[in-house]
């Protein structure tokens, strides 16, 4: 539309603001400007990115979507299928005959279809429409999602008339990016007559609702300065994180003679990212203090031995003897004070003598004796092991710093290879209120290598350079939808497969490859609970989720670089909403939950608009976590309720790869639900008795599904021996189970971020 000067008719939404959108460094196409002609658009169309424009060339109005660059002569209808906004053909089978379906209204014609292109204009090569990419149609390119696909050489910023998303940066003067270098060779091959198009894949069970619009309003923010993801860099990151896990296991074994606490490395990553100021999205590289309280606490709780859950009397007797023997051996081999050595040896020998002469004791007698021994010996054992454990924590951190530098150098070299090293600093943006939009990156994305896709039964398998990741077909179709809604720099889905590979690889690396490892860290609420939260309390946003386990299409997650293309608004601790209703089910990490409460208090105190947070945390009372105590005493607390252990469930964190019968598991700890709201939020979403009754009914119905539900996966903190207990402080360690020895760390997930 280079020879037009179109205008836009603004509609009134709940919040109307004109963010600056993109900047000159982003190189985005010009968008229509404002006008006052014609009727107003409904709020639903405004939130979906639609605006009414005026074509001076045709002297008639048309409708333009800033999210998809779609232009229509007729007013769009929400929910009606068209290939332009559904390039992967998820909602309908592709149309035969080589033309993409125009859908709801006639598509606005390209200028190139009506007039000769000028001599100095840039003309894109014509691309024949083919079968959309989907799990059932492999290796084909989708129809374009925009009617006008001219590459813009202008660098002027766009001016949206409704709260919307800034345009994604592009590379001025760069060639169009292809999905793989090998695609050039296929241009000379003879065309093959297409066969009948297979039916699109439709999941039998859906665990999300991506049609719910957001009510979250935020302050306009600049693009994120992180470098865009690339499969080669992500592969190197996976190798280095695996090496770091091995170093951790070796240090625990060599220095303390123990295996590393299960999932303590995963919780270390979560706890470090709360305070990390470094540039790597996963590996900590700039933290103060260097020694992680989470890692220190978990390793210390396994010294001198790892205690397991006791079921029988003989197990209790054997564990008591092992603890006394290990404590005595440790105090003899370390540099302990005479008083500490005397105290530990006397208590250990007294316990052994009691075991030799008393053979009629019950299980409870053995457990009481073990608790007494731990109280007497625990402080002295902690003192002699303190320096060694601190050495483990600091060693792992400094190795992580070195690895993050290596990754930064490799990523920078790759960007320079494609002349994309400049202009990656985030530009300043005009402050103002907008509807929340996905995280954008300041740097343009480099060309992506080939990623192969094939189907094995119900799993979609993506392979890059010999390394394969898997995802079930239902969640793969979900990622296609999220990508269509959120990504604005890849209308032809040429980078889709490589970005999906990077996304799955990142979460796989973060939570480990062990059996059930990381499952509890990404657990989510049941679908029926989300439905009631939206219906009764207006919830439309998840504070801790991921593209793999989210229910809404708007959510916060740990990684803006990989997740932003699929709808993530970035990390929650840097997300500052001014109004909206939110659900928060954080990873059960003490440090992360405490930082979350601080963020809640700051947001609620600074906003006069309706703001509400419904928070789900574990009921750990012995002792109570700081986050639990602070929320119970918060001045913004409107209501609090507790769901008992074994009477509710979570969706598995591995839902994107697990079997259907393993989707839900019973929570073996109680869950406390807090309603934190400011005055305006309380007036709008008051937790009344009727609303709370329906909420509890949904929780109970979700846990009463037919068939036995499995208990929490091994290694989850849900496997704690007592439902209201967590591991106590280092000075007075409490009982813990053999799979997860620290109940104070993360269990139910980001989740990374994940609900």
Image (cartoon, rainbow, N blue to C red):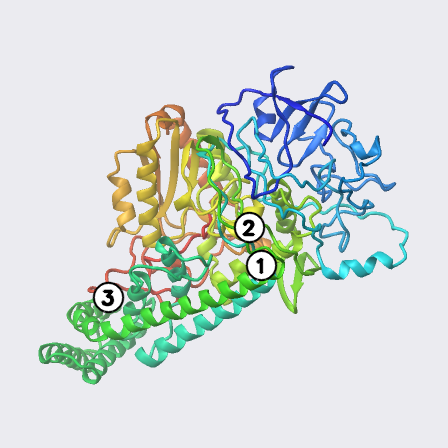
Q: Mark 3 falls on what kind of element?
A: helix
For residue 105, what is the image quadrant? top right
Q: CA distance from mark 2 to mark 3?
A: 62 Å
What count of labels does the image hold? 3
Image position of 154 with respect to 516: above or below: above
Image position of 319 with respect to 16: above or below: below
Comparing labels 1 and 3, the label whose residue is closer to the camera: 1
The mark found on residue 443 in the picture is 2
For residue 738, what is the image quadrant? bottom left
- Does label 1 or label 2 sit earlier along the sequence? 1
Q: From where the camera sits, is residue 742 visible?
A: yes
For residue 383, what is the image quadrant? bottom left
The mark found on residue 415 in the picture is 1
Please state the horizontal and vertical placement of residue 362, each as a whole percent of the image.
24, 70
Image position of 452 with respect to 199: above or below: below
- Of residues 664 and 509, the one nearer the viewer is 509
Q: Image quadrant for the N terminus?
A: top right
What residue is drawn where x is 75% and y is 52%? 136
Whether residue 639 sits left or right of residue 54 in the image: it is left
- Does label 2 or label 3 sit earlier along the sequence? 3
Please state the horizontal and vertical placement of residue 579, each as a whole percent of the image.
42, 31
- Does label 1 or label 3 sit earlier along the sequence? 3
Please state the horizontal and vertical placement of residue 29, each as a whole percent of the image.
64, 37
Q: Which residue is mark 3?
A: 364
């Amino acid at each position: 539309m280079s020879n037009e000067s179109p205008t836009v008719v603004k509609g009134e939404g709940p919040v109307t603001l004109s963010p600056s959108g993109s900047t000159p460094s982003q190189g985005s196409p010009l968008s229509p400007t404002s006008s006052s002609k014609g009727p107003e658009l409904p709020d639903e169309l405004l939130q979906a990115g639609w605006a009414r424009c005026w074509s001076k060339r045709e002297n008639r109005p048309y409708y333009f979507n800033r999210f998809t660059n779609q232009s229509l002569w007729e007013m769009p209808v929400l929910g009606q299928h068209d290939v332009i906004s559904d390039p992967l053909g998820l909602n309908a089978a592709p149309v035969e005959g080589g033309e993409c379906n125009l859908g709801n209204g006639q598509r606005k014609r390209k200028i190139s279809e009506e007039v000769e292109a000028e001599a100095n204009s840039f003309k894109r090569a014509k691309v024949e429409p083919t079968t959309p990419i989907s799990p059932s149609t492999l290796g084909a390119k989708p129809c374009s999602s925009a009617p006008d696909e001219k590459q813009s050489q202008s660098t002027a910023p766009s001016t949206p008339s409704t709260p919307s998303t800034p345009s994604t940066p592009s590379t001025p003067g760069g060639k169009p990016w292809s999905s793989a270098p090998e695609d050039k060779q296929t241009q000379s091959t003879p065309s093959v007559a297409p066969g009948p198009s297979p039916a699109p894949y439709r999941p039998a069970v859906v665990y999300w609702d991506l049609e719910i619009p957001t009510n979250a309003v935020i302050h306009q923010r600049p693009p994120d300065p992180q470098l865009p993801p690339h499969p080669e860099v992500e592969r190197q990151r996976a190798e280095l994180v695996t090496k770091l896990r091995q170093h951790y296991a070796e240090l625990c074994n060599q220095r303390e003679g123990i295996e590393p606490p299960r999932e303590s490395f995963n919780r270390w990553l979560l706890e470090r990212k709360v305070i990390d100021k470094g540039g790597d999205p996963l590996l900590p590289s700039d933290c103060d203090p260097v020694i992680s309280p989470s890692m220190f606490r978990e390793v210390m709780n396994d010294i001198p031995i790892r205690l397991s859950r006791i079921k029988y009397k003989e197990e209790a007797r054997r564990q008591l003897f092992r603890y006394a023997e290990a404590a005595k051996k440790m105090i003899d081999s370390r540099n302990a004070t005479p008083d500490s050595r005397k105290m530990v040896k006397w208590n250990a020998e007294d316990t052994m003598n009691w075991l030799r002469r008393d053979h009629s004791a019950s299980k409870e007698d053995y457990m009481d004796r073990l608790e007494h021994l731990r109280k007497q010996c625990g402080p002295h054992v902690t003192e002699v092991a303190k320096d060694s454990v601190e050495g483990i924590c600091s060693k792992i951190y400094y190795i992580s710093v070195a690895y993050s530098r290596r990754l930064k150098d490799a990523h920078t070299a790759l960007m320079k290879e494609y002349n994309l090293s400049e202009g990656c600093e985030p530009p300043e943006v005009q402050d103002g209120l907008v509807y929340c939009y996905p995280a954008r990156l300041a740097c343009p994305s480099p060309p992506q290598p080939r990623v192969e896709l094939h189907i094995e039964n119900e799993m979609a398998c993506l392979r890059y350079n010999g390394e394969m990741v898997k995802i079930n077909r239902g969640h793969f179709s979900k990622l296609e939808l999220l990508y269509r809604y959120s990504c604005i720099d890849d209308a032809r889905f040429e980078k889709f497969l490589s970005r999906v590979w990077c996304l799955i690889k990142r979460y796989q690396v973060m939570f480990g490859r062990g059996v059930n490892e990381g499952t509890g860290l990404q657990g989510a609420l049941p679908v029926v609970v989300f439905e009631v939260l939206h219906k009764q309390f207006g919830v439309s946003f998840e504070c801790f989720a991921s593209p793999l386990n989210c229910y809404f299409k708007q959510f916060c997650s740990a990684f803006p670089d990989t997740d932003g293309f699929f709808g993530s608004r970035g990390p929650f601790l840097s997300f500052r909403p001014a109004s909206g209703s939110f659900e928060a089910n954080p990873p059960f990490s003490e440090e992360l939950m405490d930082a979350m409460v601080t963020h809640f208090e700051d947001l609620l105190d600074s906003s006069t608009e309706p703001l509400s947070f419904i928070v789900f945390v574990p009921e750990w009372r012995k002792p109570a976590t700081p986050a639990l105590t602070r929320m119970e005493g918060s001045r913004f607390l409107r209501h609090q309720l507790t769901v008992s252990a074994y009477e509710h469930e979570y969706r598995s964190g591995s839902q994107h790869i697990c079997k259907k019968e393993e989707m839900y598991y019973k929570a073996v700890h109680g869950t406390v639900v807090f309603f934190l709201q400011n005055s305006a939020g309380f007036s709008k979403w008051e937790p009344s008795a009727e609303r709370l009754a329906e909420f509890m009914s949904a929780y109970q119905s979700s846990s009463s599904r037919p068939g036995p539900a499995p208990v929490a996966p091994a290694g989850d903190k849900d496997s704690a021996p007592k439902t209201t207990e967590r591991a106590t402080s280092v000075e007075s360690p409490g009982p813990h189970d053999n799979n997860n020895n620290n109940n104070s760390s993360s269990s139910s997930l980001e989740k990374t971020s994940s609900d």
